[in-house]
């Protein structure tokens, strides 16, 4: 009885297997074709059949998005061909499949219409960049890349401004960002250039210390410009190296209580000064005492510079020229002063020599002047302090800062103010 019942169940199972197809998979192929069965898992990609489901590849390679009804019919694209439909959409399409014959790719969210961002302006492929970094409506229902400011306006300091304002705007004079120190802009140019300065000092700084009056005096002259650090071009051809180093040390001392410093660039030839001296690069020209120079060299150097207007152009642009003179050695610094028109640009007055006043009292006759400020009066002249022998007279532009007399005598330090 039991074996008969077993045969009965075996026969029933075979009948059901013949009557009902199973799910797609290794056992879901009937007649060599895959069919979707309700309630069963979908056919895997790459299966064949006359009615492939949405997003699969139909027989013949037709690319579909809605599903073809026959193996030779494309999906939502163009008509199928031997390799299948190309699946392109009417918009030219970011939904297209990356390879013909495959299902459509998902649309990137950042490229969905409207295309109104700088990364996708007007279409998916246009990226806005300078000089047209913004995306704005083009008036025809789409978008285009545009500049930040509509013409004739231009961008300046983060705002759109009329370029005509550059003719009078002291913060943007002539061009965006050019601020006038005087706060006056006329016709696109800053009005009120800086005054230049010439300091002629008949002192030797070898015997000075950080607290001495000559240190304060030299510091006043060097630090007249407001920049920090002050950039100094030092002419040293004919000066002794120890004297140059000592002067640099004195300037460093003078800068310490002011929280200021100086950067020195040494010019060892006449041509180096001609080539390098510019108000753009330097604020001070420091001509050391050339007491070791060959006779005639100091005057020749100044003649070369002045023939090219190197000195006069520098001070008219707001530069400072300092000449040191110890009155010893070659003792021709007065000839350099005359050849460079540093005391009198007209040449009507000059310096004929120097007179030594070592260990004599020196008087500060111009404590109000920038060069004479905070210099003690009187103080005892150190080694190689001297007076300039000159027929020049003190006036509002030529100040005798230090002299050998309380009432004003022969000048020891002269400060000339040069109008721009």
Image (spheres, rainbow, N blue to C red):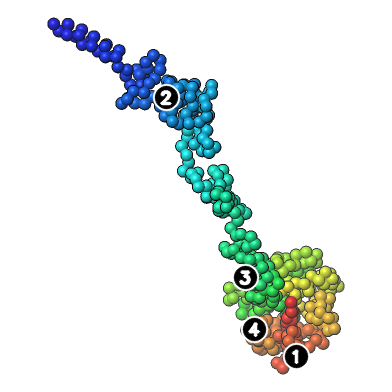
**In terms of image quadrants, where is residue 23?**
top left
Q: Characterize the local packing of mark 3: few (<14), some (14-19) or many (20 or more) Cα atoms within 10 angstroms.
A: some
Q: Earlier in the sequence, mark 4 or mark 2?
A: 2
Q: Residue at x 45, y 31 (%)?
A: 65
Q: Which residue is mark 1?
A: 409
412 lies above or below 226: below
Q: Residue farthest to the left?
A: 1
Percent from the top left, x then y, of residue 73?
A: 48, 24
Q: Quadrant of the N terminus?
A: top left
Mark linked to residue 52? 2
Residue 135, image x and y in percent? Answer: 55, 52
Q: Which mark is residue 171?
A: 3
Q: Residue at x 68, y 81 (%)?
A: 371
Q: Element type at marker 4? A: loop
Measured from the top left, where is residue 90 in percent x and y?
A: 53, 36
Q: Are marks 2 and 3 in contact (CB under 8 Å)?
A: no
Q: CA distance from mark 2 to mark 1?
A: 115 Å
Task: Give the Cα separation between the discs numbered 4 and 3.
Answer: 33 Å
The residue at which mark 4 appears reads as 373
Q: Earlier in the sequence, mark 4 or mark 3?
A: 3
Task: Please name which of the two marks, 4 or 2, marks the residue nearer to the observer.
Answer: 2
């Amino acid at each position: 009885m039991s074996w008969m019942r077993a045969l009965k169940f075996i026969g029933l199972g075979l009948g059901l297997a013949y009557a009902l197809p199973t799910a797609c998979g290794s056992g879901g192929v009937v007649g060599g074709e895959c069919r979707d069965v309700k309630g069963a898992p979908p056919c895997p990609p790459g299966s064949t059949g006359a009615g492939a489901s949405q997003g699969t590849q139909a027989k013949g390679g037709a690319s579909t998005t809605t599903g073809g009804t026959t193996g030779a019919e494309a999906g939502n694209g163009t008509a199928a061909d031997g390799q299948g439909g190309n699946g392109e959409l009417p918009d030219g399409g970011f939904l297209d499949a990356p390879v013909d014959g495959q299902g459509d790719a998902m649309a990137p969210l950042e490229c969905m219409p409207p295309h109104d961002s700088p990364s996708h302006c007007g279409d998916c492929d246009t990226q806005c960049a300078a000089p047209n970094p913004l995306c704005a409506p083009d008036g025809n229902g789409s978008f285009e890349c545009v500049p930040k400011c509509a013409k004739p306006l231009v961008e300046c300091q983060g705002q759109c401004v009329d370029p005509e304002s550059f003719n009078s705007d002291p913060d943007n004079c002539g061009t965006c960002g050019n601020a006038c120190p005087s706060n006056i802009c006329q016709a696109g140019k800053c009005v009120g250039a800086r005054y230049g300065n010439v300091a002629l000092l008949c002192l030797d700084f070898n015997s000075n210390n950080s607290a001495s009056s000559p240190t304060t005096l030299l510091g006043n002259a060097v630090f007249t410009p407001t920049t920090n650090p002050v950039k100094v071009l030092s002419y040293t051809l004919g000066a002794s190296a120890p004297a140059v180093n000592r002067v640099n040390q004195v300037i460093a001392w003078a800068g310490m209580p002011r929280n200021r410093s100086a950067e020195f660039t040494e010019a060892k030839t006449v041509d180096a000064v001609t080539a390098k001296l510019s108000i753009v690069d330097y604020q001070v020209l420091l001509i050391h005492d050339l007491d070791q120079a060959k006779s005639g060299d100091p005057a020749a150097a100044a003649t070369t510079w002045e023939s090219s207007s190197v000195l006069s152009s520098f001070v008219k642009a707001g530069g400072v020229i300092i000449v040191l003179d110890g009155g010893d050695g070659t003792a021709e610094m007065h000839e350099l002063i005359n050849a460079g028109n540093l005391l009198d640009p007209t040449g009507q007055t000059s310096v004929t020599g120097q007179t030594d006043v070592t260990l004599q009292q020196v008087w500060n006759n111009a404590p109000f002047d920038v060069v004479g400020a905070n210099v003690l009066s009187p103080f005892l002249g150190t080694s190689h302090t001297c007076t300039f022998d000159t027929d020049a007279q003190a006036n509002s532009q030529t100040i005798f800062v230090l002299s050998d007399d309380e009432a004003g005598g022969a000048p020891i330090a002269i400060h000339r103010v040069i109008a721009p």
